[in-house]
Amino acid sequence: MEHITRAPIDLTRLLTAVAGPGRGGTALFVGSVRRGDEDGPVARIDYHAYDDMLEAEVGRILDEARAQWPGTGIAAQHRLGTVPAGEASIAVAAAAPHRAEAFTACRYVIEQAKQRLPVWKREILDDGTAQWRDNPGDRVASEGDPWH
Amino acid sequence: MRVHCRLFARYAEVLGTEELALDLPERSRVADAIARVRAALPNGHLLPEHPLVALNRAHVLPSRPLRDGDELAFLPPLAGG
Protein backbone atom coordinates (compact mmCIF):
# COMPACT_ATOMS: atom_id res chain seq x y z
CA MET A 1 0.00 0.00 0.00
CA GLU A 2 1.08 3.62 -0.46
CA HIS A 3 3.13 5.15 2.35
CA ILE A 4 1.69 8.67 2.16
CA THR A 5 -1.90 9.84 2.57
CA ARG A 6 -3.52 13.24 2.80
CA ALA A 7 -6.74 11.78 4.21
CA PRO A 8 -7.32 10.25 7.66
CA ILE A 9 -5.31 7.01 8.01
CA ASP A 10 -7.46 3.93 7.47
CA LEU A 11 -6.32 1.59 10.27
CA THR A 12 -8.51 -1.28 9.12
CA ARG A 13 -6.89 -1.16 5.70
CA LEU A 14 -3.45 -1.12 7.31
CA LEU A 15 -4.29 -4.18 9.43
CA THR A 16 -5.73 -6.00 6.43
CA ALA A 17 -2.52 -5.32 4.48
CA VAL A 18 -0.36 -7.16 7.02
CA ALA A 19 -2.71 -10.01 7.98
CA GLY A 20 -2.00 -13.61 6.97
CA PRO A 21 -3.07 -17.08 8.04
CA GLY A 22 0.34 -17.84 9.57
CA ARG A 23 0.49 -14.58 11.52
CA GLY A 24 -0.99 -15.05 14.96
CA GLY A 25 0.12 -11.77 16.53
CA THR A 26 -0.39 -8.22 15.26
CA ALA A 27 1.01 -5.02 16.77
CA LEU A 28 -0.34 -1.61 15.79
CA PHE A 29 1.29 1.72 16.65
CA VAL A 30 -0.64 4.94 16.08
CA GLY A 31 0.98 8.34 16.57
CA SER A 32 -1.45 11.25 16.96
CA VAL A 33 -1.26 15.03 17.20
CA ARG A 34 -1.09 16.00 20.86
CA ARG A 35 -3.33 18.79 22.06
CA GLY A 36 -1.07 19.95 24.86
CA ASP A 37 2.30 21.59 24.56
CA GLU A 38 4.49 23.93 26.55
CA ASP A 39 3.66 26.86 24.27
CA GLY A 40 -0.12 26.52 24.42
CA PRO A 41 -2.93 24.31 23.17
CA VAL A 42 -2.24 22.86 19.72
CA ALA A 43 -5.18 23.14 17.33
CA ARG A 44 -3.57 21.29 14.42
CA ILE A 45 -0.29 20.49 12.73
CA ASP A 46 0.51 21.07 9.07
CA TYR A 47 2.80 18.27 7.91
CA HIS A 48 5.19 19.06 5.04
CA ALA A 49 7.47 16.51 3.36
CA TYR A 50 9.94 15.75 0.63
CA ASP A 51 7.36 13.41 -0.87
CA ASP A 52 9.54 11.38 -3.24
CA MET A 53 12.14 10.71 -0.58
CA LEU A 54 9.49 9.99 2.05
CA GLU A 55 8.02 7.21 -0.11
CA ALA A 56 11.51 5.80 -0.73
CA GLU A 57 12.66 6.03 2.89
CA VAL A 58 9.55 4.34 4.30
CA GLY A 59 10.10 1.59 1.73
CA ARG A 60 13.73 1.17 2.82
CA ILE A 61 12.75 0.96 6.51
CA LEU A 62 10.06 -1.64 5.77
CA ASP A 63 12.52 -3.67 3.67
CA GLU A 64 15.01 -3.62 6.55
CA ALA A 65 12.34 -4.83 8.98
CA ARG A 66 11.17 -7.60 6.62
CA ALA A 67 14.77 -8.76 6.24
CA GLN A 68 15.27 -8.86 10.01
CA TRP A 69 11.97 -10.60 10.77
CA PRO A 70 11.22 -12.83 7.76
CA GLY A 71 7.61 -13.88 7.39
CA THR A 72 6.39 -10.75 9.12
CA GLY A 73 3.83 -8.54 7.36
CA ILE A 74 4.62 -4.85 7.91
CA ALA A 75 2.98 -1.68 6.64
CA ALA A 76 3.25 2.01 7.53
CA GLN A 77 1.53 5.18 6.47
CA HIS A 78 2.31 8.85 7.20
CA ARG A 79 -0.38 11.49 6.86
CA LEU A 80 0.57 14.87 5.33
CA GLY A 81 -1.27 18.19 5.16
CA THR A 82 -3.39 19.47 8.02
CA VAL A 83 -3.95 17.02 10.89
CA PRO A 84 -6.23 18.23 13.72
CA ALA A 85 -5.30 17.49 17.35
CA GLY A 86 -6.37 13.99 18.32
CA GLU A 87 -6.08 12.53 14.82
CA ALA A 88 -3.38 10.12 13.67
CA SER A 89 -0.35 11.38 11.76
CA ILE A 90 1.43 8.03 11.44
CA ALA A 91 0.54 4.36 11.84
CA VAL A 92 2.62 1.18 11.72
CA ALA A 93 1.24 -2.36 11.70
CA ALA A 94 3.27 -5.55 12.02
CA ALA A 95 1.86 -9.08 11.95
CA ALA A 96 4.07 -12.07 12.77
CA PRO A 97 3.67 -15.72 13.75
CA HIS A 98 4.05 -14.69 17.42
CA ARG A 99 3.60 -11.46 19.36
CA ALA A 100 7.27 -10.92 20.24
CA GLU A 101 8.35 -10.43 16.61
CA ALA A 102 5.25 -8.32 15.92
CA PHE A 103 6.02 -5.90 18.76
CA THR A 104 9.74 -5.75 17.93
CA ALA A 105 9.24 -5.16 14.21
CA CYS A 106 6.60 -2.50 14.86
CA ARG A 107 8.89 -0.73 17.33
CA TYR A 108 11.80 -0.86 14.89
CA VAL A 109 9.79 0.80 12.13
CA ILE A 110 8.41 3.66 14.22
CA GLU A 111 11.78 4.42 15.83
CA GLN A 112 13.52 4.49 12.45
CA ALA A 113 10.70 6.60 11.01
CA LYS A 114 11.14 9.23 13.72
CA GLN A 115 14.87 9.40 12.97
CA ARG A 116 14.89 9.27 9.19
CA LEU A 117 11.72 10.48 7.49
CA PRO A 118 11.99 13.84 5.65
CA VAL A 119 8.90 15.35 7.25
CA TRP A 120 8.48 18.74 8.93
CA LYS A 121 5.63 19.97 11.08
CA ARG A 122 4.23 23.43 11.56
CA GLU A 123 2.24 23.65 14.76
CA ILE A 124 -0.77 25.95 14.82
CA LEU A 125 -1.96 26.92 18.28
CA ASP A 126 -5.50 27.88 19.30
CA ASP A 127 -4.57 31.58 19.12
CA GLY A 128 -3.47 31.19 15.49
CA THR A 129 0.27 31.48 16.05
CA ALA A 130 2.35 29.00 14.05
CA GLN A 131 5.86 27.66 14.42
CA TRP A 132 8.05 24.91 13.04
CA ARG A 133 8.46 22.14 15.58
CA ASP A 134 11.32 19.59 15.67
CA ASN A 135 11.26 16.13 17.17
CA PRO A 136 13.26 15.97 20.42
CA GLY A 137 16.91 15.17 19.75
CA ASP A 138 17.75 16.77 16.40
CA ARG A 139 19.15 14.39 13.84
CA VAL A 140 22.80 14.98 13.03
CA ALA A 141 24.36 12.89 10.26
CA SER A 142 27.36 10.84 11.28
CA GLU A 143 29.61 8.21 9.80
CA GLY A 144 28.02 5.59 12.01
CA ASP A 145 24.54 6.07 10.59
CA PRO A 146 23.36 2.78 9.09
CA TRP A 147 21.78 4.33 6.01
CA HIS A 148 24.91 5.98 4.59
CA MET B 1 28.35 19.82 -13.73
CA ARG B 2 24.91 21.01 -12.76
CA VAL B 3 23.23 19.94 -9.52
CA HIS B 4 19.57 20.57 -8.75
CA CYS B 5 19.11 21.71 -5.14
CA ARG B 6 15.92 21.54 -3.12
CA LEU B 7 15.12 23.30 0.14
CA PHE B 8 12.33 22.49 2.55
CA ALA B 9 10.33 23.96 5.44
CA ARG B 10 12.24 26.60 7.42
CA TYR B 11 15.28 26.44 5.10
CA ALA B 12 13.05 27.36 2.16
CA GLU B 13 11.57 30.21 4.18
CA VAL B 14 14.95 31.56 5.29
CA LEU B 15 16.52 31.38 1.83
CA GLY B 16 13.37 32.47 0.02
CA THR B 17 13.37 29.65 -2.51
CA GLU B 18 12.48 25.97 -2.72
CA GLU B 19 14.91 25.09 -5.50
CA LEU B 20 17.94 26.29 -7.35
CA ALA B 21 20.50 25.02 -9.84
CA LEU B 22 24.20 25.00 -8.94
CA ASP B 23 27.03 24.84 -11.48
CA LEU B 24 29.99 23.19 -9.83
CA PRO B 25 33.44 22.02 -10.97
CA GLU B 26 33.92 18.34 -11.81
CA ARG B 27 34.77 16.10 -8.82
CA SER B 28 32.82 18.36 -6.43
CA ARG B 29 31.37 16.80 -3.31
CA VAL B 30 28.20 17.47 -1.34
CA ALA B 31 30.24 19.64 1.07
CA ASP B 32 31.26 21.89 -1.85
CA ALA B 33 27.62 22.41 -2.79
CA ILE B 34 26.72 23.26 0.81
CA ALA B 35 29.55 25.81 0.96
CA ARG B 36 28.46 27.35 -2.35
CA VAL B 37 24.84 27.75 -1.22
CA ARG B 38 25.90 29.23 2.13
CA ALA B 39 28.20 31.74 0.39
CA ALA B 40 26.17 32.64 -2.68
CA LEU B 41 22.57 32.98 -1.52
CA PRO B 42 21.15 35.88 0.46
CA ASN B 43 20.77 34.54 4.03
CA GLY B 44 22.77 31.49 2.98
CA HIS B 45 25.00 31.96 6.01
CA LEU B 46 21.95 31.19 8.17
CA LEU B 47 22.06 27.58 7.01
CA PRO B 48 24.02 25.31 9.36
CA GLU B 49 27.56 24.49 8.25
CA HIS B 50 26.66 20.80 8.43
CA PRO B 51 22.99 20.43 7.54
CA LEU B 52 21.33 17.08 6.99
CA VAL B 53 21.44 16.37 3.26
CA ALA B 54 19.92 13.85 0.90
CA LEU B 55 21.30 12.95 -2.52
CA ASN B 56 18.84 11.54 -5.03
CA ARG B 57 16.32 10.88 -2.25
CA ALA B 58 18.64 9.10 0.22
CA HIS B 59 20.51 10.38 3.28
CA VAL B 60 24.24 10.94 2.62
CA LEU B 61 27.27 12.44 4.28
CA PRO B 62 28.89 15.65 2.95
CA SER B 63 31.86 13.65 1.67
CA ARG B 64 29.73 11.99 -1.01
CA PRO B 65 30.86 12.86 -4.59
CA LEU B 66 28.39 14.63 -6.88
CA ARG B 67 27.48 13.81 -10.47
CA ASP B 68 25.90 15.93 -13.18
CA GLY B 69 22.10 15.86 -12.82
CA ASP B 70 22.06 14.93 -9.13
CA GLU B 71 19.25 16.15 -6.87
CA LEU B 72 20.64 17.49 -3.59
CA ALA B 73 18.18 18.26 -0.79
CA PHE B 74 18.85 20.36 2.30
CA LEU B 75 16.84 18.88 5.18
CA PRO B 76 15.98 20.88 8.30
CA PRO B 77 15.91 18.89 11.56
CA LEU B 78 13.45 16.08 10.95
CA ALA B 79 10.04 15.98 12.59
CA GLY B 80 8.22 12.96 11.17
CA GLY B 81 5.75 10.83 13.06
Image: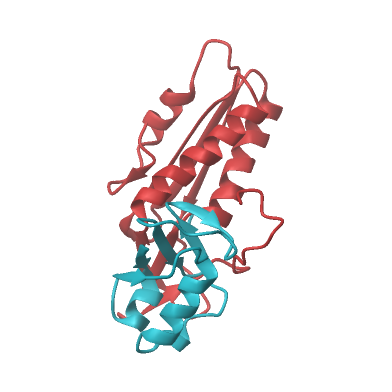
Chain colours: A red, B cyan
Residue A31 position (above or below residue B15): above
**Where is residue A59 shown, x and y percent of the image?**
47, 38
Residue nearer the viewer, B77 or A93? B77
Q: Quadrant of the N terminus of chain A?
A: top left
Residue A11 position (above or below residue A84): above
Q: Which residue is at a point 51% across and 73% down the rendered structure image?
A: B32
Q: Which residue is at a point 41% across and 50% down the rendered structure image?
A: A53
Q: Is residue A7 left or right of residue A115?
A: left
Q: Which residue is at a point 54% across and 50% down the rendered structure image?
A: A113
Q: Quadrant of residue A43?
A: bottom left
Residue nearer the viewer, A117 or A95? A117
**Where is residue A102 shown, x and y percent of the image?**
63, 29
**Where is residue A64 shown, x and y percent of the image?**
60, 35
Q: Is residue A77 left or right of residue A81?
A: right
**Where is residue A63 shown, x and y percent of the image?**
55, 33
Q: Quadrant of residue A69?
A: top right
Q: Is residue A137 left or right of residue B56?
A: right
Q: Is residue A123 visible?
A: no
Residue A21 position (above or below residue B2): above
Q: Is residue A130 visible?
A: yes
